[in-house]
Amino acid sequence: MRTKRHCRNPPPPSNQTPRRIGEDRISALPDAVLIHILSYLPVIDAVKTGVLSKRWARLWTWTPNLVFDQLGEWDEKSNNFVPFIDAFLVLHSSPKIQKLALDLDYKGKRLHLDSSLNKWLHFATRRAAEELNLQLSDLGYFHSWDFRGPVERYLLPSFIYTNNSMKRLDMSFIDVQPPDAVSWPFLQSLSIRSAFISESTIQKILLGSPQLNLLELNNCEGFDLLHIDSKSLKRLVIHGIWYPTWGTDVLQISAPNILSLEISGHFYKRKVQLLDLSSLVDVIINLQLWVEDRYCLLVEYSNILREILQKIRHVEKLTVGATSIKILSMLKERFWASLVSTRKHLILNVEPTERNISDIACFLQTSPQLERLQINMASSHGNSRKVVESQKTSSSSLQLQFDPDSYTILESCWTPKNRLSKHSLERLMTVEIVGFNEIHDRNGIVIALVRSLLKHAKDQVKVQRRR
């Protein structure tokens, strides 16, 4: 007798229709979504999508982000770049754009580019662009490395200084000379690179930008004093100066309301003098040297850095680059004694070696209230996200050999004979080694550093290793 087979109840009907082979799911998306996707493409690629179908033929004319990159997308000898932009803007349909970005070689093309640039900026103003990015590169300047020759810069048109929609402005190789007052009521971020900008112009910008939060001056010239009273500006970045043919050999900075300051790049022996920075909590120092900077100049640079560190002893967080650490190695011990700070967070962007291990120790000695230490080696050996944590009582779990000589150097920093030894690391809670790789620590210097820190820091210190 055959028994009946009892089948399971059939699954409930699905609301989703089966996917057909070759189905165009992207074209099924709403126009608004497709336009949003196109906004992430370079303009020249967005235009190419117009050949897909009748529906796609005009979608690219509504993209809100207009990025024209001559250097990255066009042949250097091509003469079609300017006509392409002109034609694109004529066909563009959206009444408002989010961003206009132009990256092109300006040198030697001033006569026929200035009128086009003025026209494109007029377009951006009429369409209420919130972000303008004008990178007018001088390729010959950078290829020749002759910083003393004449530089062609685009004179920013007067109508741009009155703008009620712009929130971010980035520009390079620009002459910034407002005829009267500046009115940028919604500007939040301003970055100026390789430009001439006077002290009076900076004041006009600050007065006319009540919401400005970030000011970045990268290799600019025309000013010897940065006096910033703005209450909205919280972050100031000074990255190098132009070749020192302008002004004095001292750059003074007074900004009592800023919270974050970055001083980086090459200053050609120009002294940076910090005045009133009473609200400062976060500082990045990453000075650079040229090949021709000889040993004798290191002493001069070290004195400049020493004066900077003396003025920022009150900040909570300090980040120091590898070159700056090298420069500070010229300081004698008596100068380090004057740099004792109240910082709680210290980031050293350097790979510990036999040459700089004592310099790292000097930073630790002058940070008696340090709670968090990060040594960033990632720039040298890459950076994965793996994190290994260990407590003080289990430091041997790292299972690596350490160099006794390096350990001895570190331990000598805490002996009674050392005048800085009274400043302990009893508040240190976290040590983070970023970019660590056993292959690059064959001498065990990093492990020697960690071992010494575990010995002299708080009982529950946490060590994190990010490869």
Image (cartoon, rainbow, N blue to C red):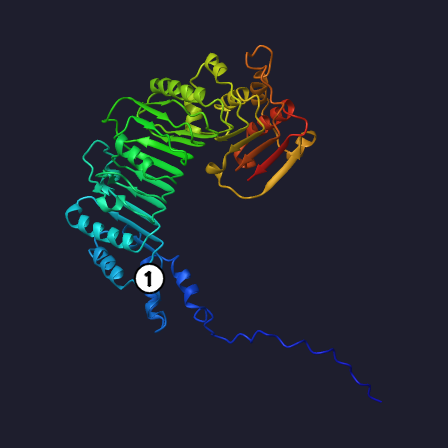
Q: Nearer the viewer, residue 209 or 64?
A: 209
Q: Residue 164, percent across and down? A: 32, 48
Query: Image height check: is 133 above or below 334?
Result: below
Q: Residue furthest top?
A: 417
Q: Residue 321, percent across and down? A: 44, 30
Residue 291 falls in image quadrant: top left
Residue 53 falls in image quadrant: bottom left
Q: Nearer the viewer, residue 280 or 331?
A: 280
Residue 196 falls in image quadrant: top left
Q: Residue 350, percent across and down? A: 48, 30
Query: Image height check: is 333 above or below 212?
Result: above
Q: Residue furthest bottom?
A: 1
Label 1 CA crowd tier, 10 Å (few <14, some 14–19, many 20+): few
Q: Nearer the viewer, residue 344 or 168?
A: 168
| Element type at mark 1 | loop
Instruction: Give the left or right position of residue 166, taking residue 461 as reference.
Output: left
Residue drawn at point x = 82 percent, y = 88 percent:
2
Q: Residue 178, percent across and down? A: 23, 39
* Residue where numbered disc 1 is placed: 94
Can residue 291 be seen by looking at this rendering?
no
Quadrant, the N terminus: bottom right
Q: Amino acid at mark 1?
A: Ser
Instruction: Give the left or right position of residue 420, taking residue 330 as reference.
Output: right
Quadrant, the C terminus: top right
Number of numbered labels in the structure image:
1
Q: Residue furthest left?
A: 111
Can residue 51 be seen by looking at this rendering?
yes
